[in-house]
Amino acid sequence: MSKGDLIIISGPSGAGKGTLVRGLLARVPRLWCAISATTRPPRPDERDGVDYYFLPPEEFDRRERAGEFLETAEVHGNRYGTLRGPVEDRIRECYRVVLEIDPQGAMQVRRNAKDSVLVFVRAPSEAELRRRLARRGSETPEEVETRMRTAEQELKLVGSYDFVVINDDVRRATDELVRIVESLPPKERDPSHGHPA
Ligand code: 5GP
């Protein structure tokens, strides 16, 4: 694996990671975003195999024991994990792989893949994060408070990241993320895949 094969977009729930990642994928070629597995039930607009692989807890445990995950974490009572196989396949096919994961997972990937690039996405203020979580409407007021407490802990990890993007304005923050990815060393083509030298 080489520098920038794995780009980790992480940070508190509600900071807007998903929106920024969608913008990034639309603008930079040969990027692929991994689909995580989770034990959380799907939200009404989510589809299995598109937003997540929704797995029963026993199936998640079985795959974890089989070593199928690159990283796993428990976030707000549900389990999440990145499946290793598709990530390795895409890197071999000369894609950069984007993981949108929580900070516990980001730290695990950093330990196992030193060349990964870690980007911390945060809201401009605590008040704004609370407002975004409330506006999303998918969490109860108690769940919003839990996420706020988690966010406070997660902010303490910011020093372990390579880049911090403050999501104050989606367009500006997406531009910044695009610049970060474009500043990475170019990916070397694997001659076994038949690309011209
Ligand atoms: P949500 O349930 O709101 O979709 O996600 C909750 C949190 O779990 C978010 O911070 C999200 O980035 C994180 N998450 C999603 N997939 C993964 C994963 O595969 N691994 C880890 N560690 N966190 C994940």
Image (spheres, rainbow, N blue to C red):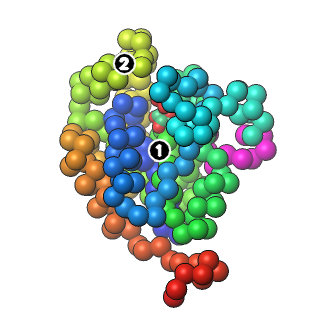
Q: Is residue 195 left or right of residue 172?
A: right
Instruction: Identify the residue at horizontal 23%, vertical 31% (top origin).
Output: 125
Q: Is residue 62 visible?
A: yes
| Residue found 75% across the figure and 32% down from its top | 59
- Of the pair 48 and 12, the residue shown nearer to us: 48
Would you say residue 107 is visible in this rendering?
A: no
Residue 98 percent location from the top left of the image: 48, 53
Image location (x, y in percent) of residue 180: 32, 60
Q: Determine which quarter of the picture holds residue 169.
A: top left
Label 2: how many residues lie within 10 Å, few (<14), some (14-19) or many (20+)?
Answer: few
Which residues, given as a range, are shown in magenta?
A: 64-73
Judged from this view, the residue extending furthest toward the bottom is 197
Residue that numbered label 2 is attached to:
137
Q: Which mark is residue 100?
A: 1
Kindly identify the residue that appears in the image at 60 percent across and 45 percent down. Answer: 82
Figure check: 79 above or below 101:
above
Query: Is ligand 1 closer than 8 angstroms to the Cβ of mark 1?
Result: yes
Q: Which mark is first along the chain, 1 or 2?
A: 1
The answer to whether residue 72 is magenta is yes
Q: Vertically, is 135 above or below 156? A: above
Q: Is residue 9 above or below residue 54?
A: below
Disc 2 marks a residue whose amino acid type is: Gly
| Amino acid at the residue labelled 1 | Glu
Quarter occupied by the N terminus: bottom right
Relative to 15, say whether 110 is above or below.
below
Q: Position of residue 123 (x, y in %)?
A: 28, 35
Q: Secondary structure at mark 1?
A: strand
Q: Is residue 21 magenta?
A: no
